[in-house]
Image (cartoon, helix red, strand yellow):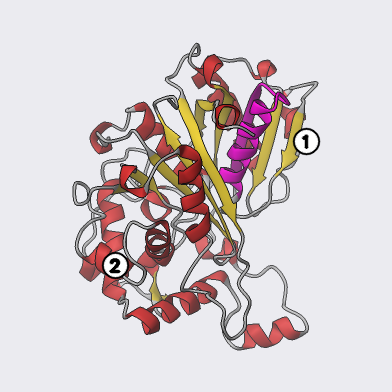
Amino acid sequence: MTGETKRNAAIAGLGITDVGKVYGRTARDFAADAVRRACDDAGLLTSELDGLLVTPGLNDDLNASLAEDLGVRDLKLLNVSRGDGSSVCAAIAYASMAISAGLANTVACVFADAPLRRGHRAGAAYAPRESPRGFDSLVAEAGLANVHAQYALATRRHMETFGTTSEQLGAIAVAQRAWASRNPLAQMREPIRLVDHQSSRLIADPLRLLDCCLVSNGGVAVVVTSASRAAALAQPPVHILGFAQSHPVHEDAKGSRFGIVSGAAESGPAALRMAGADIEDVGIAEIYDCFTFAVLLTLEDYGFCPKGEGGLYAEEGHLMPGGGRTAVNTGGGQLSGYYMWGMTPVSEAVIQARGVGGDRQVDHNELIMVSGNGGVLHHHSTLVLSPRAPS
């Protein structure tokens, strides 16, 4: 695939439903709503879609039959992507490649989920659904029964290796809340201080409540089409300049780089190479932030700071609004904005690229990196977006 053909797709529409504590709707309902909103945003009819890429969350009711709910027929491209948090960026890359190859013309990529239930704690949505069996029961008995504990293990290893501190993780949470305070879509807008982070309860040592992302109901979709067609539609096109994936799937064994290096170390530079750009060119980074530690590790692996210095980078204030050369998680991310898996960073990147971020709009929006992180640092995907067409 030549440079000319692999970079001729753009995001033309963005649809965001109500997100957060929104009850009484299924993931499938949210997904259909989000796709319709994305088409309306682009000035298209849903009947003009000839591709649909679905990314489900925890619930199993969202699948390829969404096409029936939307009433779209004769699709040229239909698939369900399951790579956890890395799925959305990967799906947008697949849509871009399909358009470049002539397999489809107008593709909707959608994520939706509805794990929250009225009267139940948010954390209950991610509790194990069945008791572990066999050797997995030994892992659970050791305390690694959920994703929080596994991320805590990765975080502790980074701390022991590089001297990273809880206060440095707290600096990430404080900075993202500062951005969220400027975002009318954010669930959590009340500013916090480092002392608030440090006094929040431990979830899985060393991770505290304010180190952990929100749980949200809702849906987000984008419409991807050719750059030339996008330029004639209702919204300014957001060009897809680069993309890449990396799936290290770390072993639970001696010599593993778990907690030290993630798939971002390969995926990020590869996406930048496709875009013909360097890390110094990036004005905005929308980083998948299921936990504060995921932000820290991705910053290091993308090359925004040296390996082992992600904590210091945050502590020095580079992530605060106006604090650094590159603005990070300008909508508050998943920690304070809303948790729509990989669509959280993608949606904010589109808003920033269009220049409609309001009080949080960043002037230097010519090049935006977007990350997706799946599993417990098992999968990573990266997009490079821009309001400007590739030269």
Is 68 positioned to the left or the right of 382 in the image? Answer: right
Kindly give the residue lying farthest to the top in the view shown. Answer: 232
Q: Which of marks 1 and 2 is nearer the N terminus?
A: 1
- Res 270 label: none
Q: Give the range drawn in magenta.
A: 87-112
Residue 84 pos. (x, y %)? 61, 55
Residue 306 in the image: x percent, y percent?
33, 65
Residue holding disc 1: 65
Judge the density around disc 2: few (<14), some (14-19), many (≥20) Cα neighbours within 10 Å. many
Above-or-below relation of 140 to 375: below
Residue 64 drawn above or below residue 11: below
Residue at point 31%, 81% (across, down):
163
Q: Quadrant of residue 224?
A: top right
Please determine whether, in this image, residue 215 is positioned above or below residue 353.
Answer: below
Q: Which residue is drawn at 39% across and 56% down?
A: 335
Front position in the image: 291 or 258 = 258
Could you tell me how far apart the alpha carbons at marks 1 and 2 are, in whole angstroms? Answer: 42 Å
Residue on which the image places disc 2: 170
